[in-house]
Image (cartoon, rainbow, N blue to C red):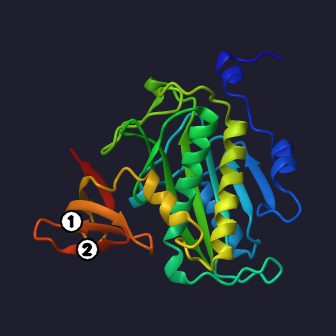
Amino acid sequence: MTSSYADLERPPLSARALTRALVVPGGLWTRVDVREETGSTNADAGDAGRRDEPEGLVVIAESQSQGRGRRDRQWTSPPRAGLTLSVLLRPGTPDPQRGWPAAPPGSYGWMPLLAGVALREAVTRVAGVEAALKWPNDLLVGDRKCAGILAEVAGDAIVIGIGLNVSTRAEELPPTNGVAATSLRVAGAESTDRDPLLRALLRGFARWYEGWREAGGDAEMCGLTAEYRRACATIGRRVRVLLPSGGELTGEATTVDGDGQLVIRTVDGAEHRVSAGDVLHVR
């Protein structure tokens, strides 16, 4: 059997090895489903959620043909060049065995931010790349977008999708209308091995999620608020926020509040709390 150079550089993920490492007694992850190709991992995980699949499913795609970001933007990546995955969570369902109360719906805004914290930790530790978070759903490396996060509701479940550019070459990066794209490879990563990156990401995600659930969805109590604020490059920046309503808001991003909302101070001194929107960092 012969393999191209690209195949040698981008080996497939092993569902068996990942399951052995991540699906453990008492752990968050219950099933790891690695697919060679799919339309959208978020759609797949959402379908499973509506079929009453328990919390803890991880769907991973080596190639995704209909990946989406916010506002239905396309997320594209060459096969096996990145990490494309979605996880299924049920934060509103109490878990008496673990002592977890139901998290209130008002706390769900922390889900994509929690994913961002775990992703940044994995990228920094495993790839040796300094990264920061752009509220609410981007991982930045040198002011360029290296990953995106998309949270969606699926019945009474929440699906969190993550797309990270790992070994993507500069000429393979897709054009963007906003922040320019990059990858760990382009940024000079010490390692572009997806397996340890994925393990670190899912273990970190589980650790933060378990702490958040134990705290009843209180992000401040479990330390998530402080960690997110420390990692967020949006805080302290002048920003322009494109709101879902079609309006926009310009001012200084002063903090992220206890509900995960971005606090904007406009020139008249008024403070506005934003729960959703596209944020542009103004130089």
- CA neighbours of label 1 inside 10 A, class few (<14), some (14 to 19), many (20+): few
Q: Who is closer to the viewer here, 208 or 188?
A: 208
User: Judging from the image, what secondary structure is the residue with disc 2 in?
Assistant: strand
Which labelled disc corresponds to residue 82? none
Q: Residue at x 33, y 59 (%)?
A: 278
Q: Residue at x 48, y 71 (%)?
A: 109
| Position of residue 17 measured from the top left corner of the image (x, y, whole percent) | 85, 42
**Which quadrant holds residue 238?**
bottom left
The amino acid sitting under disc 2 is: His
- CA neighbours of label 2 inside 10 A, class few (<14), some (14 to 19), many (20+): some
Report which residue position mark 2 lands on. 272
**Which quadrant holds residue 11?**
top right
| Position of residue 93 measured from the top left corner of the image (x, y, whole percent) | 69, 82
Q: Earlier in the sequence, mark 1 or mark 2?
A: 1
Describe residue 33's horizontal placement relative to residue 16 as left or right. Answer: left
Inter-mark Cα distance, 1 to 2: 11 Å
Describe residue 31's horizontal placement relative to residue 211 as left or right. Answer: right
